[in-house]
Image (cartoon, rainbow, N blue to C red):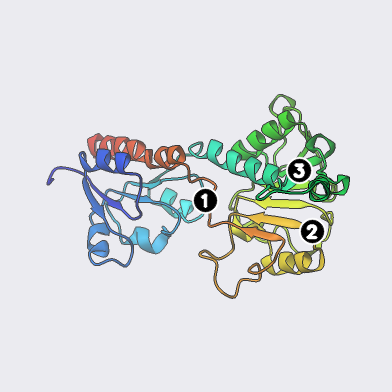
Amino acid sequence: MANQPIVILAEPIEEAPRAWLAERVDLRALAPGDPGFNEALAVAHGIVVRTATRVDAGMLDAAPCLQAVARAGVGLDGIDQQACRERGIAVLNTPDANTQAVVEFVIASVTHALRPRDQVEEALDRQQWQAMRASDRASVQMDQMVFGVLGFGRIGSRVAEVASTIGFKVLYHDLLEIPAAGRGKASPVELETLLSDSDVLSLHVDGRASNRHLLDAGRLDLLRDTVLLVNASRGFVIDEDALASRLRTTSSMHAILDVHDREPIPGDSPMLGLPNATLHPHIAARTRTGLANMGWVVRDLLEHVQAESQSPA
């Protein structure tokens, strides 16, 4: 392995891309804080990270040979991209690896919440049967509802497309002007209109600092009392204290959160124990295909490292 590039695997990836990479580099599976990590970092040409590892200026200063940081996933929130640029270090990711997985999760969550299905588990008499089928228990059809999408990027636009196909009227808000050809059946609106008019609101914004507590107490107050709020983007987008307060006072509101301001969710989280909050352990992207797609960022990593080694000094 003396002539092979050294790559640190800071977090696990799927076995197939891991094995592929291990055949081609001196692969060292070490997380920050592990014995030997600092020594490996000092000579590493590449590092593969996921969500937990933070790549900041301090880490980069300790990695004089580093040529590429590969994020096995989409978001680059944990990587100081400016510091990488200043040092000539490439930042690689897999921007479309989990789009389908997250879209499926969001749509499945929404349809399950809007169309609850009672199950018959024992014999019923006619009165019990009719009670379960009573008109006051009937669901509202989705083609009578407004589906709001906050953030119209890869995932948000695909969620909007599927929601439109189901029959929802779809509204969206994005910082960018989306050309008409890229909107499908979705209509752009101001943020306040999106919040006040949506029966379902799905969040798909990025991790820029200005999005922290984008949904604060004031904006959460604009939401309908019966809104279904779904967040599969970034946990810090929502002020969880304010959301918990709104949920406690508005039993008809329901929040489905796959991402959280603090992960794992701590015991003092204001979201725990709320009957109208459904909390998931950051699983929207975790299909077998999605995980494999994210892991194959190692191909780009190896290509970049090999190209750098062949460049004239």
* Spot occupied by residue 38 in the image (x, y as percentages of width and height): 26, 64
Residue 283's mark? 1
Residue holding disc 2: 219
Residue holding disc 3: 148
* Spot occupied by residue 157 in the image (x, y as percentages of width and height): 66, 35
Q: Are marks 1 and 3 in contact (CB under 8 Å)?
A: no
Sequence-first tag of 2 and 1: 2
What is the secondary structure assignment of the residue under circle 2? helix
Question: Is label 1 or label 3 in front?
Answer: 1
Task: Measure the C-alpha gap from mark 2 to mark 1.
Answer: 26 Å
Q: Residues within 10 Å of mark 2 (few under 14, many from 20)?
A: some
Query: Which one is in front, 28 or 230?
Result: 230
Q: Residues within 10 Å of mark 3 (few under 14, many from 20)?
A: many
Task: Measure the C-alpha gap from mark 1 to mark 3.
Answer: 22 Å
Residue at 36 percent of width and 36 percent of height: 300
Q: Amino acid at mark 3?
A: Gly
